[in-house]
Image (cartoon, rainbow, N blue to C red):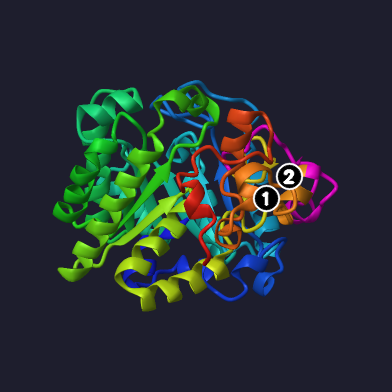
Amino acid sequence: MISVSRLLCGLKSYGDNLRYRKDSGSQLSGTSRGLGPVVVWNMTRTCNLRCLHCYSNSGDHVHEDELTTPEAKRFIDQLAEFKVPVILFSGGEPLLRNDFFELAAYAVEKGIRATISTNGTLITPEVAKQIKKIDIGYVGISLDGIGVNNDRFRGRKGAFDAALGGIRACRSAGVRVGLRFTINRHNYFQLPDIFKLIEEEDIPRVCFYHLVYSGRGSKMRDEDVSHAETRRALDLIINKTLDFHRRGLDKEILTVDNHADGVYIYFALKRSNPERAERVRQLLQMNGGNRSGMAIGAVDWSGNVYPDQFTRNHILGNVRERNFADIWRDTKNPIMRGLKDRKRLLKGRCATCCWLDMCNGNFRARAEAVHGDFWAPDPACYLTDDEIREVP
């Protein structure tokens, strides 16, 4: 996750506490300040939408093997003992679990910051008040376009209007809310409209995700943006972030799942503001790049543990059988062992890239999906051959 607003404008947010510290890159197995990883919990596979890019292959059917409420509380206990700083309740659609509020409140009681990833269509004013009451720290609502474009992508007519209603309900209830937008060929041209929306609706945060080829998203490889289109998208995100800041509209703008973005921002600043560029270089080196299997992990509805929410074909263990911390620290699994010290395993242009300390090989799930090799180059890296040889 790259904080564009932090790198360009120096704005700070809660997540920067975890991303940009001198010991951020050392958070390999709960060692950084004694903290475990941020955990994405796909607490259900059931969903009221059917998004084209869904990495969990979720749908409207009910899965019988979900963790029960007592099992889920034992799992949350494990996270608290491991000093996990944040749990992201995800799905499917997490609000479809009858015990969602009970479990989210339990996590907060245990000292874990609870956040939600939701499609937003089920957030009524009453639901938003409940979210506020139990002190959930943040609600990320997914929109993948404006109006009918979002509805087509998310598989339901009216999804955009319902999600926008959820955003407004959160804003009215005083809940911190933001947008999640996955860039692809069918919607990247609507990026200006997304920035217009967050200004008009006074939305304080937006995360722009790069497409990862996992689950149903694996069928969208040919519908991803080109490298040239990615660069144009980043140029727009950079310009809009700076424009907001100049006008006193300090929004938190982030990109997710492509650490080439940090290097690209560094290049832009080297041309326009060399002094700021040097500070950005330091921040990116503190962060250390992609930290799947290090500072972020994922658990699915039935308790399976993964290096991140997209790397779903490598199961590390199950919390019904072993404590989460023991699974996370165990390096007998070659994928987990490799992720904690991956630079020597990377191949191709990743292995020779001079920005490896800032990127850490980018996203392994994409590399495996395209090349069939977990340690191959990430095909979504849009830096040119000359750029990856440039002296920092």
According to the picture, the residue beneath numbered tag 1 turns out to be 75
Which residue is the extreme one toward the right? Answer: 332
Using the image, determine if residue 334 lies above or below residue 6.
above
Q: Residue 51, percent across and down?
A: 40, 27
Q: Quadrant of residue 11?
A: bottom left
Q: In this view of the protein, which residue sits in the foreground, 127 or 327?
A: 327
Using the image, determine if residue 49 lies above or below residue 128.
above
Tally the marks: 2
- Amino acid at pointer 2: Val
Q: Main secondary structure of the magenta part?
A: loop
Q: Residue 322, percent across and down?
A: 80, 47
Q: Are marks 2 and 1 in contact (CB under 8 Å)?
A: yes
Using the image, determine if residue 377 lies above or below residue 287.
above
- Amino acid at pointer 1: Phe
According to the picture, the residue beneath numbered tag 2 turns out to be 319
What span is in magenta? Answer: 309-334
Q: Quadrant of residue 63?
A: top right
Residue 196 visible in the picture: yes
Helix, strand or loop at mark 2: loop
Q: Is residue 293 left or right of residue 60?
A: right
Badge 1 crowding class, 10 Å Cα cut-off, few under 14, some 14 to 19, many 20 or more, is many
Q: In this view of the protein, which residue sits in the foreground, 204 or 112?
A: 204
Helix, strand or loop at mark 1: helix
Q: In this view of the protein, which residue sits in the foreground, 353 or 171?
A: 353
Q: Residue 336, percent across and down?
A: 75, 48
Residue at the image point whose x is 36% and y is 42% from the top: 230
Q: Residue 271, percent across and down?
A: 33, 67
Which residue is the extreme one toward the bottom? Answer: 275
Residue at the image point whose x is 70% and y is 64% from the top: 30
Using the image, determine if residue 110 lies above or below residue 124.
below
